[in-house]
Amino acid sequence: MLKSLTLCTALMTAVAAPIAAQAPTPDTVYEADVVRADFDRLYAGLRAAHFDLFAVTPQAVFDQRHAEMRAGFDRPMTRLDIRREFQEFTALARHAHARIDFPMEAYGAFRAAGGRVLPLTISIREGRVFVETRAAALEDLAPGDEILAFNGQPNTVWIPALTRHLSAETPRFAHTLLETYLRGLVWLEWPEMTEATLDVRHADGSVETLTLPFLSGDALAPAEEGEQPFSLDGREARMIGSDIAYLRPGPFYNTEPDGNVWDTTGFAAFVDNSFNDFRSAGAEALILDLRDNPGGDNSFSDRVMAWIADRPFRFASRFTVRVSEETTAANQARLDTLPEGEGGMSATYADLFAAHAPGETVEIDLPYAQPRPDGDRFEGQVYVLINRYSFSNAVTVAAQIQDYGFGVITGETTADMATTYGAMEQFTLPRTGIIVGYPKAHIVRINGASESHPVTPDIALDFPVLRGPEDVVLDQLVAHVRTALDG
């Protein structure tokens, strides 16, 4: 079973790692020589284990930055500060799967202790920044107001100050992530900040400078319900009229509380029941909604694909893995947690790693999944709806359907990549215990395009700058599908 990276920290591939000598906290302080030693280990581990660390950023740039940062580690540092600096270095690769995760524990503790944060959320479109939601107390600010500057800094200055903490292939991808992590990144970059000034342009064209106090707890409650954007959380299956089926499968992993995240039982039952209902209702077309989908595992998405595929399929045309000591150790740690005889892909990896030396790259012949039998699958036209918040395996699914011709891709271009460096693993820095994620594989989409790139829809839909309470994008697609059916 080959797992794709999701952007949810909780769903990072679980890898047992050596425990640091002390039980660290964000405030644990390490001497400069310890910091430098783990920094050297970070760079060495990435060079050895990442499939191609220098694919985008040349080694000379990495070497120079390593030397500059290392020289700056000349004093004791807290674990939180080390983590922040090490992630900035890791993000130089410009690969989403090479990263040290955002320190959610420390941020959560800060919030739980009454820490105040920026009281708004944003939407970034083509470099322009708009207020998406704001705390009810901010009466002078409204959704749709354009942010021109933050604390006197234009967007071209303060946005890069935050996105340097993010691992992403493109600025657009980084901007998409920034929308999600904005409050946390402001805290990470400017931990003492308790208010900010914003230069904003209102809907009437007037420009104003506002001072926003940071807020906490109930004071962050959003403005009236009518301003809140609609949600695509959860799973949904329904008919739209008598002819169009709508399926939002939700994440491609088990979302049941306290359940095994990779147990497909409930998901498979939901998918099968949904398609059986669609067929019984006489649906002539299907809208498969992958917007806001964080991804997951192909053992889940294959269940959906089998209902619409007309021939065997797999999720990549090429899947090439780099062998390393770090990956071998991570894979073995995962194997050690599995019951005897249930090693699956980890067992396959173990055999492969035993037969090849560290540094070698090996192409794996991926198995094909099978479609449902003739007469027992959905035969109508398939339309897949994507947006820039479709991530990881959701992007892979869209690329599969597009490349195999199983359906029509609609919506907006994804931020995440179809061909990508993925199949994430982790290693642990021995002194600080910081966990480093990296891609061990190069995954090439079915059409064979080897350069990292997103999925571009066959039919582009109009997305408003702000997501409002109504799903106007889905309405557009329904109108298009109905016209096609009537025609």
Image (tube, rainbow, N blue to C red):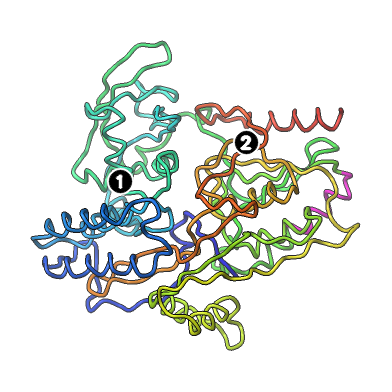
Amino acid type at circle 1 is Arg
Q: Determine whether, in the image, residue 255 is placed left or right of residue 369.
A: left
Residue 67: where, in percent of width, then height?
17, 58
Q: Compared with residue 469, is residue 400 higher up or lower down, i.e. above or below?
A: below
Residue 17: where, in percent of width, then height?
36, 76
Q: Nearer the viewer, residue 405 or 19?
A: 405
Q: Is residue 279 magenta?
A: yes
- Residue density around tag 1, few if under 14, some if 14–19, many if 20 or more, within 10 Å: some
For the C terminus, give its image quadrant.
Answer: top right
Q: What range of the chain is rendered magenta?
A: 271-282
Q: Which mark is residue 411?
A: 2
Q: Compared with residue 98, is residue 365 higher up or lower down, i.e. above or below?
A: below
Q: Which mark is residue 308?
A: none
Picture residue at 43% right of the left edge, 64% below the top: 51
Residue 245: where, in percent of width, then height?
78, 43
Mark 2 touching mark 1, by CB under 8 A?
no
- Residue density around tag 2, few if under 14, some if 14–19, many if 20 or more, within 10 Å: many
Amino acid type at circle 2 is Gly
Picture residue at 60% right of the left edge, 27% below the top: 462
Residue under label 1, please give it: 164
